[in-house]
Amino acid sequence: MAKRLGICGGTFDPIHLAHLRSAEEVSEELGLDRVLFMPCASPPHNKRVWASTTHRLAMVHLAVKDHPVFEVSELEVVRGGHSRTVDTLEELKAKYPGSELFFLLGTDQFFYLHSWYRPERLLELADFVVMDRPASPRWDLLDYLRTELDPAFEPDGNGWFRVPGGHGVRPMSTTLLDISSTDIKRRVADGRSISFLVPQAVEDYIKSMKLYIDQGEDR
């Protein structure tokens, strides 16, 4: 049973090398036993998803195949509908009793954590690892934590910000690969190469399944 469990969620439409590289670096830095790549069933805020759940899951499986730490979780897909992170973390706590949970996300997402459902409960269930992103907001993390989440947040001397006796938030710089799923889809639709943006197996799958060829009005 995993003792230190990372969670990396998203639409993965498609999964690409920036997802994988940042998770690799966090895993090494924090000594994670497993990192779960967890595609959502339906994204929040009515975000358009182009590939079906079946295709997105297949691409994630191909991307993490044979990696010693990475694996796929179908928890949110099986649950269906719009997934709330607090429900996912509650389920993982029950499934992996005694494990430490580390939720991985970028600064572009983390600075909206106060608007998520029950943010105070999220910080009771897991530690949050906040990875820098190209073109991310340049806000002061500690000021955000104290202003929007809990004024008791303090540096703990090990790179973490924590509330006394509680879970924490760790900013982490990872290799900034300026790759986006949106750009990949546009390249496919325009007939351009996506080599070295996604794993070769994912590129082959996209070609064989003819994904993203026609993006309609959203191109």
Image (cartoon, helix red, strand yellow):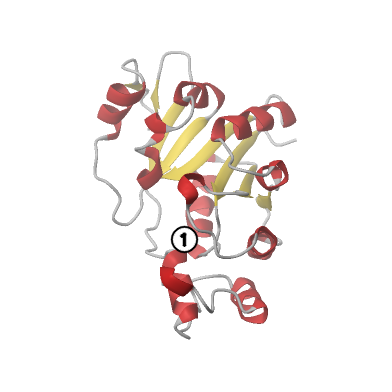
Q: Residues within 10 Å of mark 1 (few under 14, many from 20)?
A: many
187 or 70: nearer the viewer: 187
Q: Which residue is mark 1?
A: 18
156, above or below 38, in the image: above
Q: Is residue 85 left or right of residue 111?
A: right
177, above or below 210, in the image: above
Identify the residue at image location x=41%, y=41%: 130
Which amino acid does the dot numbered 1 rest on? Ala
Location of residue 219 by image quarter: bottom left
Location of residue 115 by image quarter: top left
Place of residue 19 in the rendered image (x, y in percent of width and height, measured from the top left): 50, 57
Place of residue 204 in the rendered image (x, y in percent of width and height, measured from the top left): 63, 78
Q: Is residue 200 left or right of residue 46?
A: right
Place of residue 76 in the rendered image (x, y in percent of width and height, measured from the top left): 66, 43
Secondary-structure class at tag 1: helix
Please identify the quadrant where the N terminus is shown: top right
Q: Is residue 20 left or right of residue 142?
A: right
Place of residue 34 in the rendered image (x, y in percent of width and height, measured from the top left): 65, 44
118 or 26: nearer the viewer: 118
Total tally of numbered discs in the picture: 1
Identify the residue at image location x=66%, y=58%: 53
5, above or below 52, in the image: above
Taking the view exactly as shown, the residue that stands out farthest to the bottom is: 191
Taking the view exactly as shown, the residue that stands out farthest to the front is: 217
Identify the residue at image location x=39%, y=57%: 175
215 or 150: nearer the viewer: 215
188, above or below 39, in the image: below
